[in-house]
Amino acid sequence: MQIDLSLIGMEKGRQYETIITTQNSEGVKNAAPMGVLCSGEGIILNRIFKGSHTLDNILSEKEFVVNITHSPELFTSSLLESLDESLFNDDLSLKDCDAYFRCEAISFTEAIKKSDPIKSSGEALIIKSKVVELVINRETKAFNRGFGYVIESLTNFQRFDLVEGELKEFYIKRFKEAYRVVNKVGTKEDIKAMHKIKRELKAKGHDL
Ligand SMILES: Cc1cc2nc3c(=O)[nH]c(=O)nc-3n(C[C@H](O)[C@H](O)[C@H](O)COP(=O)(O)O)c2cc1C
């Protein structure tokens, strides 16, 4: 049976921020924040940089869990520390998550994309996986970075008229980055909003 990720607000073609939990062949559990691209029909894609525990564990076990949470603490701790074993359920999910889904990796492909701002090509793998179980603990939507950028761009909107020189450059750079990210990962509504903000800024004579 195909699993419907729209039950947790995931749209086809959009990317969501999650915490992926994995374990190695000795059963040592690991958690790390990871983006998940919803590919539709119960399929997801990940692009994971080489050298991470998450990638090593998925390559060896072919299974992992995607945890949906809005907890700043869980995101921060899973990036900066090793999450304590007591925070995991036996099935590898995180005790505190709103929802989770279990995945089985189907294929691994070398990433060829060159536009990543941090690393260049050949250092990551694209993993295609099938979602085999979805558990919803409480009503939730997977976190998408787009809306935060829309709000930030709106809060900066009037500042464009008030600043000059280096500070103006700073706001232009911030807007360009927000525009790039929203177009890459945001929902249709987020993208529409960013286009509208850009049009307005251009109409006011700002050079974007
Ligand atoms: C919100 C967020 C999303 C991330 N998404 C990814 C991703 O999609 N792919 C990736 O390789 N790293 C991603 N990272 C970085 C990894 O979480 C980071 O490299 C981490 O140290 C890997 O931990 P691990 O070695 O325990 O797997 C992300 C980080 C954050 C904060």
Image (spheres, rainbow, N blue to C red):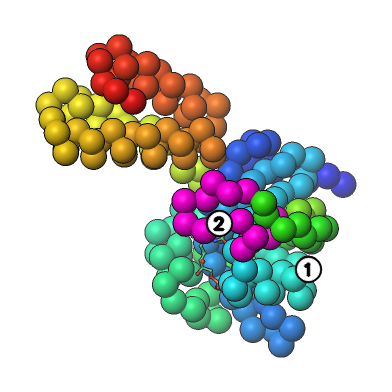
Q: Please rate how many residues cluster around mark 2, counting C-alpha atoms within 10 Å: few if below 14, some from 14 to 19, many from 20.
A: few
Q: Is residue 112 left or right of residue 144?
A: right
Q: Main secondary structure of the magenta part?
A: loop
Instruction: Establish if 43 lies above or below 108.
Output: above
Can you tell me whether the CB of the residue at mark 1 lies under 8 Å from the nearest atom of ligand 1? no
Which residue occupies the foreground of this view, 154 or 176?
A: 176
Q: Position of residue 176 (x, y in %)?
A: 37, 34
Kindly identify the amino acid type of the residue bearing the numbered disc 1: Lys
Q: Is residue 5 left or right of residue 203?
A: right
> Are the residues at dot 1 and dot 2 in contact (C-beta closer than 8 Å)?
no
Q: Earlier in the sequence, mark 1 or mark 2?
A: 1
Task: Name the residue that disc number 1 marks.
Answer: 62
Give the residues in magenta. Answer: 113-126
Assign a secondary structure to mark 1.
loop
Quadrant for the C terminus, please.
top left
Q: Position of residue 139 (x, y in %)?
A: 57, 45
> Residue drawn 18% across and 29% down?
159
Q: Please rate how many residues cluster around mark 1, counting C-alpha atoms within 10 Å: few if below 14, some from 14 to 19, many from 20.
A: some
Residue 47 in view of the camera:
yes
Instruction: Indicate whether residue 123 is drawn in magenta.
Output: yes
Q: Quadrant of residue 100?
A: bottom right
User: How far apart are the two marked residues, 1 and 2, measured between alpha carbons?
Assistant: 25 Å
- Kindly give the residue lying farthest to the bottom in the view shown: 26
> Residue drawn 59% across and 72% down?
52
- Kindly give the residue lying farthest to the right in the view shown: 1
Kindly identify the amino acid type of the residue bearing the numbered disc 2: Ser
Which residue occupies the foreground of this view, 200 or 15?
A: 200
Which residue occupies the foreground of this view, 79 or 88?
A: 79
Task: Name the residue that disc number 2 marks.
Answer: 120
> Residue drawn 41% across and 65% down?
76
Nearer the observer, disc 1 or disc 2? Answer: 2
